[in-house]
Structure formats: C-alpha cells, structure tokens
C-alpha cells in the first residue's frame, strides 16, 4: 500500500510529458541519453514547487520560461585593422532572434544558472528556485536578459555595420 502511494505521487506530472516545452526541457537536462534521470529531476523540481505553491507548479514553470526567453541578441564584430587611428574597438551588433531559438536560449541559460547555483543542494532544488525567481522577474537569468537588451539598445545605431552589400 505504501509503495502504491509513492508511485501515485511520482506520476503526478506525467500528463505533461507530451507538452513541447517540457519535452525540450527534459532533452536539455539529459546527459548521455539518461532520459529517465532528466525526467526525475524535472518531476522533483515541479513537485517541490507544487509543495510550496499547491496547484501552481506548471503555471510557475511556464511563467519562468517565458520570462527568460530572449527576443534580441548581440553579435560581436571583431576589431578592424588599425591604420590611422590606433583606438579601434569591438562593435556589438544587435540581431533579432526567432521566437523558438529565443525560448531555447532562455531554457539553456536557466539550466546553466541552476547548475552553477550551488553544488551542496541537488539540481532539482536549484532548478525549482531558479524557475520561481524567473517567474517573479527576479534572479540571475532575468538580470542577464535585461543587461543584454540594454547593450543591444545602446548599440542599435551601429546596426548598419553588420549589413553586407
């Protein structure tokens, strides 16, 4: 009877496995083809969010991912050759990112931040904390996104440098 209750708890979020964002998150979490381990990590992260905020775990997951998606990126154009002026500098060229690629970059940065967060606590705890902070528009990943947008806006007058004729 006890094992049956534990089994019911573990498959609480099994219905969302067919969701494309959840599938993508699982495939990004996966190392060396260990899909079941990646599913368990995401499942535990969602369970911990559900424990703190009952019935809102999937909502927090979606809000967190949509908060960290990137709309605009910055490409670095290398320094030109120094001829007359000795002060050449790197030029940052803003570029538009497609929505699917922006979601992918956001999820990757979310996972990287949760892996870098703390080695003493398990990954699913760090992932749930990062998702919660991202859903509240706080945290390291959202801050990086805002700084990248600020850099792109400040360099938008140099966009003509990237045009090839």
Image: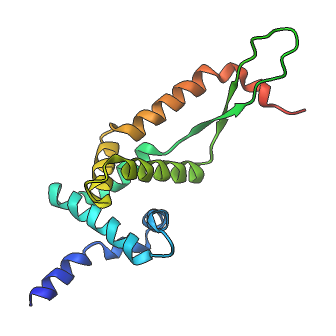
- The residue positioned farthest toward the front in the image shown: 120
* Res. 93 image quadrant: top right
Q: Nearer the viewer, residue 12 or 28?
A: 28
Residue 122 drawn at (x, y percent): 28, 59
- The residue positioned farthest toward the left in the image shown: 1
Q: Nearer the viewer, residue 51 or 55?
A: 51
Count of marks, rendered view: 0
Name the residue at 24% across, 77% down.
10
* Res. 136 image quadrant: top left
Residue 140 drawn at (x, y percent): 38, 38
**In the displayed structure image, the side of residue 86 where residue 40 appears, left or right:** left
Name the residue at 41% across, 33% down.
143
Quadrant that contains the C terminus: top right
Q: Coloring scheme of the render?
A: rainbow
Q: Is residue 62 visible?
A: yes
Q: Nearer the viewer, residue 52 or 130?
A: 130
* Res. 58 image quadrant: bottom left
Picture layout, residue 54 above or below residue 150: below
Residue 91 drawn at (x, y percent): 70, 24
Q: Is residue 55 visible?
A: no
Picture layout, residue 4 above or below residue 162: below
Quadrant that contains the N terminus: bottom left
Residue 132 drawn at (x, y percent): 28, 48
Name the residue at 49% across, 62% down.
28
- The residue positioned farthest toward the top in the image shown: 85
**In the displayed structure image, the side of residue 113 where residue 1 appears, left or right:** left
- The residue positioned farthest toward the bottom in the image shown: 1
Picture layout, residue 136 above or below residue 112: above
Name the residue at 59% across, 51% down.
101
**In the displayed structure image, the side of residue 55 where residue 142 appears, left or right:** right
């Amino acid at each position: 009877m006890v094992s049956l209750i534990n089994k019911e708890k573990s498959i609480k979020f099994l219905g969302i496995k067919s969701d494309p964002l959840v599938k993508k998150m699982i495939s990004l979490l996966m190392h060396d083809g260990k899909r079941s381990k990646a599913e368990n990590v995401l499942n535990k992260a969602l369970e911990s969010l559900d424990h703190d905020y009952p019935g809102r775990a999937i909502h927090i997951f979606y809000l967190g991912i949509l908060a960290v998606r990137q709309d605009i990126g910055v490409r670095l154009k290398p320094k030109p050759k120094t001829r007359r002026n000795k002060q050449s500098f790197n030029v940052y060229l803003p570029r538009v990112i497609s929505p699917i690629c922006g979601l992918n970059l956001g999820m990757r940065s979310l996972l990287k931040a949760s892996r870098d967060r703390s080695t003493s606590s398990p990954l699913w705890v760090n992932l749930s904390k990062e998702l919660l902070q991202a859903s509240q528009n706080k945290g390291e990943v959202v801050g990086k996104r805002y700084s990248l947008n600020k850099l792109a806006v400040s360099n938008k007058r140099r966009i003509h440098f990237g045009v090839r004729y």
